[in-house]
Amino acid sequence: MTYTIEGRTGPWEIVVGLEVHAQVTSHAKLFSGAATAFGAEPNSQVSFVDAGFPGMLPVINHECVAQAVRTGLGLNAKVNLWSRFDRKNYFYADLPQGYQISQFAHPIIGEGVVEITLADGSAKNIGVTRLHLEQDAGKSLHDQHPQKSFIDLNRSGVALMEIVSEPDIRSPEEAGAYLTKLRQILRYLGTCDGNMDEGSMRADVNVSVRRAGEGYRTRCEVKNVNSIRFVMQSVEAEARRQIEVFETGGTVEQETRLFDTARGITRSMRSKEDAHDYRYFPDPDLPPLVIAQSWVDQLKAALPELPDVRRARYVAMGLSPYDAHVLTLERETAAYFEEVAAGRDAKIAANWVTGDLFAAINRTKTSIAAPPVPAAHLGALLDLLADKTLSGTLAKQVFEAMVEEGKSPGAIVEARGLRQVTDSGAIERIVAGVLDANTDKVAEYRSGKDKLFGFFVGQTMKAMQGKGNPALVNDAVKKLLG
Amino acid sequence: MHPTDFTLAGAAEALHEGLISSVELTQAHLDAIAALNPRLNAFLAVTAEAALREAAASDARRKRGDARPLEGLPIANKDLFCTEGVATTAASRILAGFIPPYESTVTAQLRRDGAVFLGKLNCDEFAMGSSNTTSAFGPVENPWRRGNDPDARLVPGGSSGGSAAAVAARLALAATATDTGGSIRQPAAFCGIAGIKPTYGRCSRFGIVAFASSLDQAGPVARTVEDCAVLLRSMAGFDPKDSTSADVPVPDFARACGRGVKGLRIGVPREYRLDGTPPEIAALWEQGLQWLRAEGAETVEISLPHTKYALPTYYIVAPAEASSNLARYDGVRFGLRETVAGSDLRDLYERTRAAGFGAEVKRRILIGTYVLSAGYYDAYYLQAQKIRALIKRDFDEAFGRVDAIVTPATPSAAFGMDEKQDDPVTMYLNDVFTVTANLAGLPGLAVPAGLDHQGLPLGLQVIGRAFDEETVFAVGGAIERAANFRALPAIRAGVG
C-alpha cells in the first residue's frame, strides 16, 4: 500500500531520490598521495596538490578507482570502461583549486539496483542512476575566531563516491531502508566505512509530493543530511512543508534547503535564481579514465559475499529469515556468527548470538567489533553444551561469568566446579536422600498427586547446586519413585 | 672571443677542453646581465650568488671527472617555472611574495644534468600575450633595432619575451620557455634565435604555472638548433606527476640536427598563404623551401583546410581553461591578499583579483568564463573542441603524405612597443601560424632564416609528427645551415 500523508485536502504521495556522498576507503586521496585518516590535526594531511598550489597536477589514485568499481559491482550496476573527469567551477575558501574535479557527463558507474526490505517483510527495488568519483572540499570553521574563518584542508581532495538513486523512494521508511542497505553493502565491500557521524557518508535528499496518479511535481533538495534518522525526518518535514504550500494555494519553487535538526524543519538555503553556474568542462589535466574489462572481472571475482547472498545462505543453513537478516546486517556480526557456527549447530549458534550475546553487548555498551565475549569462547561454550558437560542453565551461568571475567568457558567451569554431574549412581544416592527427607510428599505422590514429580527433581537439583544432568536426574527420580 | 658568445654546445666543449671554467662563464653572463638588464628588463630575478656557488661546485665536479650533460652551463628560466626557494611570479602581481617550496620537473631535470641557473625571466603575465607587454613588472625590450629607425624600441614577442631577449642579447647561453599558442616560436623569431615547442606530453607540466593545460608545453630557446636539441633532451621525459606526460623514450635530439633532409617530403600548406602577409615573408618562405630542395628534399603543396578556424578556436579553448586554472589565485593561501577590515570572503576575492591581475588576464578570464557558461557552452566551447579535432585530423592526413611542414613563423617582424596595443584582436593575429601546432599537440620549431628590409630577423617554422622532433630538428638544422644567419642584435653583451 502506498504511503501517504493526509493533508487538509486529501492524501499526498511522497517522491524521494537520494544523492549519497560516500567517502572512499583508501589510504590516499583521489588525486594526491596525502593521507585520509579521520580526526588528524587540522591541515596535517594536505599536499600541495590538495592546497591548489601553482603548477600542481592531479594524478588518479587507482585504488580509489578500484573501490568505485567494486561498489558498482555490489550495486549490480553497469561499469563504464571509459569515463571522464570534469571540473565543476565555483569559488569558496575551502575549495583551493577554485573547482572540484568530478565526473559530470561520463560517470564510471551507470545504472544499478538496490533491494530493500521493509518492516512488513516485503522487498522493493530502488534504482541507482549512477555513481561517480569526485573530490571532497576542505572544511570551513566559522566558530574559532570572532572575525575570521579558519580552513582545514585535511578533507580537501579526499575521494568521494556520489551515488544517485532514481526517484523510486516513496516514504521515510523506504528512505531509511535504502540508506541502511546502501551502507550495509558499502561496509561489506569495504569501500566506505559508512560512519555518518564522522562525515564519511552524507545524503542530499530530493523531495517532492503529488496526488495519486500524477506525474512528478517540482522537487526541493535538502542538502548534507548526516544521519539515517535525520534523512527520514527531513523527508517527512519537507513533504509536509510542500503539502502546506500547495494546500494554501502556493507553488513549490525548486531550491536548495537545509534540515534544521533542532527544530525538525527545513529552511531555504538558496533559490534556483542563486544557483551556481558551475561551468563544467572536461579537466584538461586528466586523460579519460579507461579501464579494462579483464581488470573489472578480476575485481568481481575477488568481491566478498554480499549481504543478500549471505542471508540466503543462512536461511539454507536452517536459520529463520529474521535471524538471517539480523545476523547479516553488519559484516562484523556475520563474521562473528560464522566463527561461532563453524562446525557446530547453526541454529543454536544463531540463538546464542542474537540472544545472549546481543543482550550482553547492550548491557556492557560494547559492539560486535569489540565483543564482550570472543567468538572462539562462545564456540567453546557451545561445545560444552553439546557434549553435556554443561546443562542449558549452567551454560547461561558460565556465559555471564565469561562476560564478567573475560575468561574461557573451560577455565570458568574448572574454577567454579560447574561441571555437570553425569554419574547416575551419585545422582540416585542424592535422589534417595531427597525421598527419605520427604516421606509425606512421597506418599502423596504415590496416592496420585503426579505434579509433585517436579518438586523431587527441583529438590535434587538444588541439593546438587544445579549441576545434575537434567535427563539423568529425571530418570533417577522416576526410577526411585517407581 | 667573449665568453657570452659561446653557443651552448660550444661552451660545453670549451668547459670540457678546460679553456674556460663554469665560474668564469657564469660571471661573464652575470656581468652582461648587470650591464644590459636595466635596459632590456629580461630578468625579473637574478640569482647571482647561487649561480656562482653552483658554478664553483660544477667546476669541482668536472675536476673529479664526473661531469654531467649540461655541467656548468649558465642558463635561465622563464618565471612560469616554479623554482624551489626562488620567488616565482608568472609576471603577475597576484603571486607577490610566492616562493615555491617545490621545483618544477623540467627545471629539476636541468639541475640534475648540471645546468647553472642565472635567474628568472620576464614574460607576459601568466604567459598571456604576444609582445611581453602584459608583464606586471614592465615590458621586455627586444635587443634588435630597426636599421632605418634605430631609436624605436621593439617588442621581443611573447609570451616568452624575456627568454628570447636574454638569449639573443647573450645574457644566457639558452633559456627555458613555454608555448601555449606560439609563446616560444614567435619571440624566438622576433629575436633572431631558435626555439622549439615539443610535442604535447614530451615535457612534464608539473610545477609550471598553468595557463591552458591542454595546450601548454615547455621548450627551450637558444641561439642554434643544436642547442635547442641539447637542452630539450634534458627537459623532456615521462613524469608520473603529470598525467598528460607521455611515457615514450627521449632520443638524442642533437644527433638528428645534422641528419640532412635528403628524400624527405616537405609539406607547404596553401592555407598559410594569407592575404596581407608582407611579400618579404612570402619570399623568405619560398627561399627556405628552395634551400631544402637543394639539399634533396621534395616540397609538396598540401591543404590544412580548417586552418582559418584555428585562431578563433584557440581563443576559446585557451581562455576557457585559463579561467578555471586561474581560479586558485584567490588570496586565501599564497601570493597577494587584498582585504580591508570587516570585509567578507567575496570582498577578499574581488579586491585581490582586481588588484592582482592585469587587463589582459582579466580579459581572458572573462572570455573563458563566458564560453563555458550555461547557454553558451555548446556554441563556443563544444564547437571549438570539434574544430580542434578537425584541425588535428587535417594534420594527420597531411602527415600521411609528408614528413614535415614548413611555414613562416610569424606574419611580421618585431613591432614597436607602442604598436598593436589598442586592439587585442590585432595582437592575437601574431599567433596565426603557430596556434595550429598547439591545438594539434605537434612539435614546432622556429629557426632564424633571414632579415627583413628593416634589418629585423624573420623565422621559419618546422612542424612535425607527434613525437618526431628528430625530423623537425633535421629540417631545422638544414634551414639553419643554408640560411647561415650571422646578423647580431644591436644590444648584446660586450657591445652595450
Image: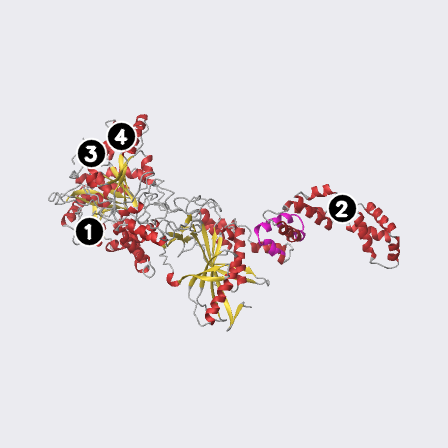
Kindly identify which numbered label has been placed on residue B179. none
Q: Is A345 inside the magenta-drawn segment?
A: yes
Say what secondary structure mark 1 lies in.
loop
Is the residue at mark 3 from the same chain as the one at mark 1?
Answer: yes
Q: CA distance from mark 4 to mark 2?
A: 95 Å
What kind of residue is marked 4?
Ser
Q: CA distance from mark 3 to mark 4?
A: 14 Å
Q: Where does residue B100 sit, x and y in percent of width and height? A: 34, 41
Return the disc, 3 or 1, that comes first in the chain's sequence: 3
Between A92 and A344, the residue placed more toward the observer is A92
Instruction: Nearest to the eye among marks 4 and 1: give it.
Output: 1
Q: How many angstroms separate mark 4 from mark 1 (CA)?
A: 41 Å
Q: Which mark is residue A420?
A: 2
**Distance from label 3 to label 1 (Cα)?**
34 Å
- Residue B22 badge: 4
> Residue A278's spot in the image, x, y percent?
37, 57
Query: Image height check: is B26 above or below A471?
Result: above
Disc 3 with disc 4 on a shared chain: yes
Can residue B253 be seen by looking at this rendering?
A: no
CA distance for labels 1 and 2: 103 Å
Question: 10 Å neighbourhood of mark 2: few (<14), some, or many (≥20)?
Answer: many
Which label number is shown at residue B5?
A: 3
Q: Are marks 2 and 3 on the same chain?
A: no
The magenta region covers A323-349
